[in-house]
Every structure is written in structure tokens, then in C-alpha cells.
């Protein structure tokens, strides 16, 4: 999906909602456990219920890897259920030396390899440009680089001073010499909203993937105020607040209601630009 196509979807749906498919078999409604593939049945139901309001879906790869071969099959079939007009994110947080990164990129971008064809993958920048550039070699695919995360440990490294600025700021500046905003996004945690203004100044055109709104307590209002651009510029992720809005037989209705509530709030912020 191109930059302009993603921007168009945001304004067409009046939404920048990304639904995180962090599907835990221990948390899905018990009536689905009789299905041949309970995770797939749950994911498909969530996707069908929320696709009117979401512009992106983000499976967290760890939830599928933890299930071994059947988890990879669930992931592949889940990807096939996502509408073509929705942006897909492999939340894999990969990052290693060049030849290993090349194989990771092949895993998530080449359907003839592992049977997957995501639009993007999350990548850790710690090992530098040669761990990231293999992902950037794919036409029409995106790297979403970890910049400033919401976890308490983000202070251990991401905020450390490097040449009179924080390390996360150096990452954002340096990474933009590797690729333009049509291939490169940054992860910024929603609980770091006070830094979003500075981040937006450093990366005025790049999309930002913002997890942490919803169950983690991030403010959608603050994220939107500092992060929105004329092209949209945001993908705000919600996982648990949508997936587990109900654990009963009404889980799809409740998931849809929560996705719609978020979309309606986003519509208001887009209208205020």
C-alpha cells in the first residue's frame, strides 16, 4: 500500500484506527474453543465486525509463534481475512545483522517464502542501518521503526542523551537518511504524548504507529492533537479494549461498538484540522 493510498483510506473512513490482533487462546470466548482453529475463528469475527471502522490490522507475531506450527497457520489464514483496503502490520520487532534481516524480510514480505505478504513490519533499530535496509529493499513495503515506546524501561536507553539530544531523537533523524516517509514509519507510545510535538517536528511527513490507547491508558485526544498531519499521519492501535470488550457470545457486537466509538472520536479530530 502506498503513502497516498493509506492517507486516502484514513479520510475515506474518517479513521486512523489500527486493530491489534494480539489474540490469546486463553482469553477468547469459550464457545469458540470447539472450532477447528479457535484463533482464526476469533480473528475473522473481529475483522468482520470492525473493518468498517479500521484502516489497519496488526497481528502481534509473538502470540502466533507461541503456538508453534498451528500458530503460523492461523496467522497466514488471518492475513487472508483482512480486506485489501486495510494496511497490514507484522508486529515482529525484528532486527539483526544483514543476512538474518534479509531472511526476516523474506518471511513477512514474500508470499512464496512463508506464505505471508504483510504491508509492513516493526523493526528494532539498535543494530543500525545494515539491520534495517534489507526490509527497505521491497517495493511497496514499509519499515515501522521503534522510536519511543510506552514501557517503563524506555528510559533505560531511549531517553539517554546523545550529543545533546535523546537517543530516540537521534534514531528518528538518522533513519530518515535511509528512506523517505513513503517507506518509513515510527513507533511512538501513546503514553509519551508530551513528546509527540517534538517527534512530529523531527518527522513532519512520516506516519506514526501509536500503541497504548485504550487498555493502556493513552489519550487519543493528546495523540491526535500533536500527531495528526494534513495526510493523516497516524495509525492509533487498540488491542485489548476491542478484542476483549466482551468474553461472551456478544463479543463481536461489543468489539464493533468499541471500534465505532474510537472511529467517531477520530472523525471529530480529523474534522477539527
Image: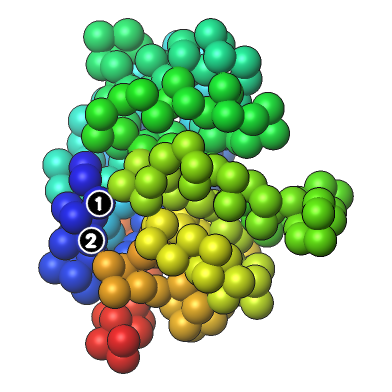
For label 1, the crowd category at 10 Å Cα-Cα, with few meaning under 14, some 14 to 19 and many 20 or more, is: some
State whether residue 53 appears in this view.
Answer: no
Q: Where is residue 22 in the image (x, y as percent from the top left)?
A: 49, 43
- Residue 132 appears in view: yes
Residue 7 coordinates in the image, percent (x, y): 23, 61
The N terminus, quarter of image = top left
| Display coloring | rainbow
Q: Element at badge 1? A: helix
The x and y percentages for residue 60 are 49, 38
- The reply to whether dot 1 and dot 2 touch (C-beta < 8 Å) is yes
Rendered position, 264 above or below 5: below
Looking at the rendered structure, the secondary structure element under dot 2 is helix
Residue that appears at 25% across and 51% down: 3
- Residue at the disc numbered 2: 7
- Camera-nearest residue between 106 and 139: 139
Q: Around disc 2, counting alpha carbons within 10 Å, would you say few (fewer than 14), some (14 to 19), or many (20 or more)? A: some
- Left or right? Give the position of 1 relative to 64: left
Instruction: Report which residue position mark 1 lands on.
Output: 3
Query: Residue 75, image x and y in percent?
Result: 37, 27
Tag on residue 51? none
Kindly identify the residue that appears in the image at 19 percent across and 70 percent down.
Answer: 11
Q: Residue at coordinates 53% horizontally, 8% vertically from top-left?
A: 99
> Viewer-proximal residue, 44 or 271?
271
Q: How many labels does the image show?
A: 2
Is the C terminus in the top left, top right, bottom left or bottom right quadrant? Answer: bottom left
When the figure is inspected, residue 22 is found, relative to residue 162, above or below; the finding is above
Looking at the image, residue 176 lies above or below residue 37: below
Q: Is residue 9 left or right of residue 114?
A: left
Picture quarter containing residue 117? top left
Instruction: Choose between 230 and 123: the one closer to the eye.
Output: 230
**What's the distance in space between the residues labelled 1 and 2, CA to CA?**
6 Å
Name which residue lies at 14% across and 68% down.
12
Amino acid at each position: 500500500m502506498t503513502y497516498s493510498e493509506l492517507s486516502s483510506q484514513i479520510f475515506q473512513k474518517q479513521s486512523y484506527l489500527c486493530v491489534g490482533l494480539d489474540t490469546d487462546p486463553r482469553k477468547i470466548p469459550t464457545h469458540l474453543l470447539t472450532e477447528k482453529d479457535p484463533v482464526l475463528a476469533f480473528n475473522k469475527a473481529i475483522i468482520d465486525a470492525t473493518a468498517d471502522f479500521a484502516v489497519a490490522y496488526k497481528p502481534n507475531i509473538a502470540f502466533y509463534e507461541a503456538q508453534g506450527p498451528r500458530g503460523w497457520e492461523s496467522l497466514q489464514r488471518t492475513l487472508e481475512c483482512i480486506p485489501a483496503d486495510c494496511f497490514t502490520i507484522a508486529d515482529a520487532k525484528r532486527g539483526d545483522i544483514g543476512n538474518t534481516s534479509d531472511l526476516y524480510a523474506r518471511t513477512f514480505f514474500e508470499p512464496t517464502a512463508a506464505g505471508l505478504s504483510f504491508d509492513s513490519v516493526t523493526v528494532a533499530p539498535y543494530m543500525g542501518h545494515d539491520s534495517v535496509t534489507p526490509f527497505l529493499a521491497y517495493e511497496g513495503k514499509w519499515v515501522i521503526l521503534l522510536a519511543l515506546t510506552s514501557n517503563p524501561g524506555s528510559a533505560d536507553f531511549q531517553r539517554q542523551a546523545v550529543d545533546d539530544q535523546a537517543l530516540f531523537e537521534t534514531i528518528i533523524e538518522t533513519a530518515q537518511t535511509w528512506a523517505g516517509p513513503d517507506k518509513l514509519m515510527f513507533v511512538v507510545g501513546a503514553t509519551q504524548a508530551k513528546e509527540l510535538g517534538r517527534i512530529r517536528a523531527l518527522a513532519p511527513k512520516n506516519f506514526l504507529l501509536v500503541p497504548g490507547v485504550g487498555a493502556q491508558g493513552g489519550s487519543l485526544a493528546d495523540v491526535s492533537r500533536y500527531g495528526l498531519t494534513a495526510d493523516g499521519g497516524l495509525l492509533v492501535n487498540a488491542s485489548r479494549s476491542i478484542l476483549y470488550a466482551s468474553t461472551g457470545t456478544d463479543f463481536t457486537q461489543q468489539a464493533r461498538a468499541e471500534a465505532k466509538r474510537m472511529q467517531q472520536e477520530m472523525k471529530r479530530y480529523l474534522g477539527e484540522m
